[in-house]
Amino acid sequence: MTLSFRYLLKIRKMSKVVLITGASSGIGRAIASYLHEKSYVVYGTSRNPKGGEFPFAMVALDVTKKETITTAVAEVIAKEGRIDVLVNNAGKGITGPIEDTPTDEMRSNFETNFFGAIDVIKAVLPAMRKQGSGVVVNVTSIAGYMGLPFRGIYSASKGAFELVTEALSMEVKPFGIRVVSVAPGDFATNIAAGRYHTPVFEDSAYKKVYRENLDLMDAHVDEGADPKMMAAAIHEVITKKSGKIHYKVGGFMEKFSIVLKRILPDRLYEKLLMNHYNL
């Protein structure tokens, strides 16, 4: 074994091992690429990682299928001996009036955004407890801080994940594990293409205003910030030894909307949102 190879092996052992779900595109890919450039040992995941070209390792994982979670986590631990950071990023969008949206689609959204993410956490925690350290970063959404019209189910799934983050933080802190949430606003990704859009039904009471808001939602994504901003924020969060539980990453008005919700009377805040969405 040459000296240079020994040195590289030593550096790799010193580098933190990061597992990132939903890393084949969008924010997840931006985070994985950024951390890879910062010399982290990165394992991204997607349901079907074959066929794509990535500068970091990819493993197959579907958050709605527990057996794939177990296999993926075991594969990373077998290769690296540890998992230092979990970035729980996999998720999907859903739009539609509550009345018109199929309940099965609502359940499906929660299976990915909430229950699937929790199953990944459950798979990683035993290794983190054993090593006496770890960071779990739950990617939520600024939408999770308020009930947005025609995005109510998405808001609910991400809001629930925010609260679970708080509970989990207290439960695992005695084991040396830190749990945080990072809530992005609108970023320029392909999330709109992957959303479940409730159809605009011809006989729907919400037909006109829902159609208008679909266009507005897509425009917000198209005009969103560079996902590298989110990647840099996550890097900063995981390098901290302590800090907050909740972080928000986005434009000024997106973050300020959370402050307004906290200080304004409910009905006044509701009126502001309704005006924004032309309701």
Image (tube, rainbow, N blue to C red):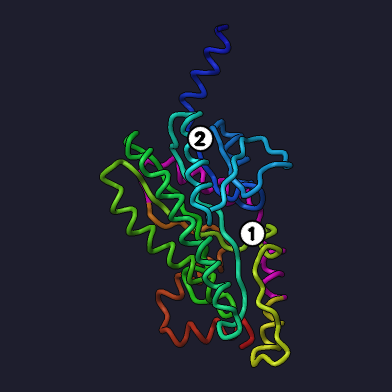
At horizontal 45% and vertical 87% (from top left) the residue drawn is 267
Which disc, if any, is residue 187?
1
Q: Is residue 218 magenta?
A: yes
At horizontal 42% and vertical 50% (from top left) the residue drawn is 121
Relative to 240, 105 lies left or right: right
Q: Work out whether 239 lies above or below 144.
A: above
Q: Work out whether 218 lies above or below 12.
A: below
Chain part drawn in magenta = 215-243
> On the image, numbered disc 2 is attached to which residue?
76
At horizontal 54% and vertical 73% (from top left) the residue drawn is 106
Three-letter amino acid code at disc 1?
Phe
Judging from the image, what secondary structure is the residue with disc 1 in?
Answer: loop
Q: Quadrant of the N terminus?
A: top right
Please state which of residues 274 and 115 is positioned toward the viewer in this rendering.
115
At horizontal 53% and vertical 14% (from top left) the residue drawn is 7
Relative to 264, 24 lies left or right: right
Relative to 69, 124 lies left or right: left
Q: Nearer the viewer, mark 1 or mark 2?
A: 2
Residue 155, percent across and down? 51, 71
Which badge, 1 or 2, comes first in the chain's sequence? 2
Residue 172, percent across and down? 30, 48
Relative to 23, 13 lies left or right: left
Three-letter amino acid code at disc 2?
Val
Q: Decide if residue 237 is in sight here.
A: yes
Please state which of residues 70 and 10 is positioned toward the viewer in this rendering.
70
